[in-house]
């Protein structure tokens, strides 16, 4: 008989005096687990599954722009969505305030607050090893004064562990952008359709469709460039206008609903991956590249069916126990009933 079995039997005999058989059983399990390798159903997702690539920096993005190589950007709102985006090779990952709707179930972006954005930034940053990561400044966190904006930006970078921030607005927010960039924090501008101001601009409408509107988009883009933005998002702008604005700027433009003439593109990951139920409205500019919802639903339904029919878990999914140990465990329980 092995020493481990002798020791186990000795422990079992000492536990026979325990009044509660469940306590005895639990003690046995704890004792044995100390000699076993820890096994968990919640293993980390952070183990690299693809070759490591160099960290994308501001200089990397500038080089891409100079070479006229499109910059790829996508949103992420938590560790898994950032993990897959980073491994897919995205140049930039945006923790956008769109997470208000796609992650928190809110009606629009005006509901999400700074603390929630910081929490999601922190989750995304843990998964993002290579992509340049940006955190959105939500409505109410930067409009009062440049000092307020700088304080919010510092929190997003310091607590959220991202490399820069994004904020909406053009000429009127140039002093705010300048305040943040002077503190050494990279800022991604956002002009054209600015969702946080949907009520002021008449809803989610294309911007720059008239000559006056197009000039406004250009002036806003030039203003945020002069204030220090390293790049600017052009949202819901006619392709021709976005292309002309891009040519007038020295910094990259990231289009979303602005045509292929921009320096790069961004989409909301939930939209482009199809992680939503049938019938959900999608903007015209969204191309759905997958159907994550259907695949997930199919998998969950299969799981439900197998649990109901007791097909799962099968023996292959359970942990074995040596027969002699099981016999001794049963004897111990029976002994306590006498």
Image (cartoon, rainbow, N blue to C red):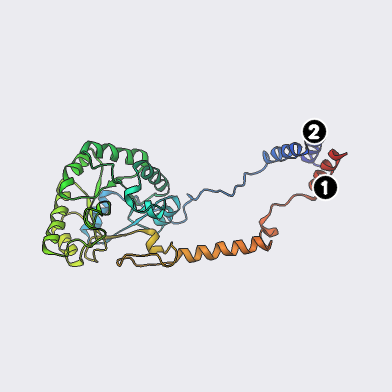
User: Residue 154, position in %: x, y?
Assistant: 29, 38
> Would you say 50 lies left or right of 309 here?
left
> Is the residue under label 1 in contact with that under label 2 (CB below 8 Å)?
no
How crowded pointer 1 is (Cα within 10 Å; few <14, some 14-19, many 20+) is rated as few
Q: Secondary structure at mark 1?
A: helix
Residue 19 tag number: 2
Front residue (pair 131, 3): 131
Q: Secondary structure at mark 2?
A: loop
User: Residue 287, position in %: x, y?
Assistant: 34, 67
User: Residue 194, position in %: x, y?
Assistant: 24, 54
Query: Which of the 4 image quadrants contains residue 309?
Result: bottom right
Is there any visible trace of residue 96 in the rendered image?
Answer: no
Q: Is 192 located above or below residue 18 in the figure? A: below
What residue is rendered at 72% in x and 36% in y? 27
Quarter of the image that includes the C terminus: top right
What residue is rendered at 82% in x and 32% in y? 17
How crowded pointer 2 is (Cα within 10 Å; few <14, some 14-19, many 20+) is rated as few
Residue 327 tag number: 1
What residue is rendered at 16% in x and 45% in y? 174
Residue 250 tag number: none
> Would you say 59 lies left or right of 277 here?
left
Front residue (pair 161, 47): 161
């Amino acid at each position: 008989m092995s020493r481990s079995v002798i020791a186990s039997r000795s422990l079992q005999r000492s536990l026979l005096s325990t009044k509660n058989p469940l306590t005895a059983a639990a003690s046995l399990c704890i004792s044995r687990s100390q000699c076993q390798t820890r096994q968990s159903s919640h293993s980390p997702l952070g183990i690299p599954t693809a070759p490591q690539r160099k960290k994308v920096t501001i200089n990397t993005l500038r080089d891409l722009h100079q070479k006229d190589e499109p910059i790829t950007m996508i949103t992420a709102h938590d560790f898994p969505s950032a993990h897959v985006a980073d491994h897919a090779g995205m140049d930039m990952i945006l923790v956008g305030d769109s997470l208000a709707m796609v992650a928190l179930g809110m009606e629009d972006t005006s509901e999400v607050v700074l603390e929630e954005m910081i929490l999601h930034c922190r989750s995304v940053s843990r998964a993002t090893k290579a992509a340049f990561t940006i955190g959105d400044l939500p409505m109410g966190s930067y409009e009062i004064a440049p000092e307020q904006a700088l304080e919010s930006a510092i929190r997003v970078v310091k607590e959220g562990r991202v490399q820069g921030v994004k904020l909406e607005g053009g000429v009127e927010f140039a002093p705010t952008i300048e305040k943040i960039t002077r503190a050494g924090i990279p800022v991604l501008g956002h002009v054209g359709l600015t969702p946080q101001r949907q009520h002021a601009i008449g809803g989610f409408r294309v911007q720059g469709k008239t000559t006056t509107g197009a000039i406004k988009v250009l002036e806003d883009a030039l203003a945020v460039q002069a204030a220090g933005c390293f790049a600017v998002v052009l949202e819901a702008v006619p392709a021709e206008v976005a292309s002309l604005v891009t040519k007038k700027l020295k910094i990259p433009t990231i289009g979303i609903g602005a045509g292929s003439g921009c320096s790069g593109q961004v989409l909301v990951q939930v939209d482009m991956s199809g992680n939503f139920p049938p019938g959900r409205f999608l903007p015209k500019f969204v191309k759905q590249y997958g159907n994550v919802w259907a695949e997930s639903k199919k998998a969950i339904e299969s799981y439900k069916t197998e649990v109901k029919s007791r097909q799962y878990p099968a023996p292959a999914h359970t942990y074995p126990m040596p027969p002699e140990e099981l016999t001794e465990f049963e004897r111990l329980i029976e002994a306590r009933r006498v």
